[in-house]
Amino acid sequence: MGGKATKNEGKYLYAVIPAAGDREYGNIGIDGESVYLIADNQVAAVVSNFSNGKIRPERRHIAAHQAVLKRLMEEETPLPITFGVIAEGAKEIKRILSLNRKSFAEQLRRVHGKVEMGLRVAWDVPNIFEYFVNTHAEIRVARDQFLGKSRVPTQEDKIEVGRLFDRVLQEDREEHTDRVEAILSPACFEIKRNVPRTERDVMNLACLVGRKAVDKDFEAAIFEAARGFDNNFTFDFNGPWAPHNFVDVELRS
């Protein structure tokens, strides 16, 4: 464990940050390795030694990767690297930094002093289809017409009602997300809409927020937005995170 590697030892890459001296972060890396910097002019790679060739996406490895990003976030906003990137050695790391220096520097400037916050809004109802039947007359009419007790519904009947439900569900998502974004926008530099993960998800937003604005402006905007919805909705915000959704780290090598 620990120290800086021999010349040919592999380097596991966690993030890119502005170069700022020779820092070490302790033995918090994958397999308990020491995490340190390899710099090239204005940018530096956050790395640890890794000699096993390939890395499996095991829970302990992913947790270590996230722990390093969390440690970096205590001091500055890094450009997070996707899990699993391993360079052959320090020479390759310096080559990656040199080839991508302009992109790294521009993106570091853009996210400086900012963090990513997440917001997930979901329908908190026992049955999402029945909720829409009760709140949307056109779905209720279609349900009664095609799926009523007066006849046995065909597969086509079920598909037709399903298509209507999906359309109205998406329309409601768009409407609700527009309302929430309008309230959050003044507290955010950028907002990105991610694909809802489940049918019950109304929206899954990533928000780029100033570090100093999280505890006051951003949280206040979340509570203001939530007041516009009834108890059939839940608001869950999380973070701060490294700005995964707001950087595009394509490693030219």
Image: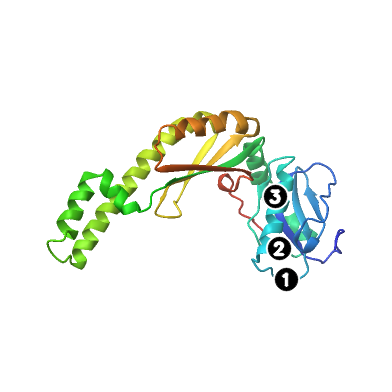
Give the residue at x 75% y 61%.
30
User: Which kind of residue does numbered mark 1 sit on?
Assistant: Gly
| Crowding at mark 2 (Cα within 10 Å: few <14, some 14-19, many 20+) | many
User: Which kind of residue does numbered mark 2 sit on?
Assistant: Ile
Check disc 2 and report its element: helix, strand or loop. strand
Q: Please tell me whether residue 168 is drawn above or below residue 2 in the rendered image.
A: above
Identify the mark at residue 86; answer none if there is no mark: 2
Check disc 3 and report its element: helix, strand or loop. helix
Q: Pointers 2 and 1 in contact (CB under 8 A)?
A: yes
Check disc 1 and report its element: helix, strand or loop. loop
Image quadrant in which you'd find residue 8: bottom right
The answer, for residue 89, to whether it is visible in the render is: no
| Crowding at mark 1 (Cα within 10 Å: few <14, some 14-19, many 20+) | few
Give the residue at x 58% y 49%.
248
Q: CA distance from mark 3 to mark 1?
A: 22 Å
Front-most of 70 and 20? 70
Q: CA distance from mark 2 to mark 3?
A: 16 Å
| Residue occupied by mark 1 | 53
Image quadrant in which you'd find residue 1: bottom right
Question: Which quarter of the figure is the C terminus placed in?
Answer: bottom right
Q: How many marks?
A: 3
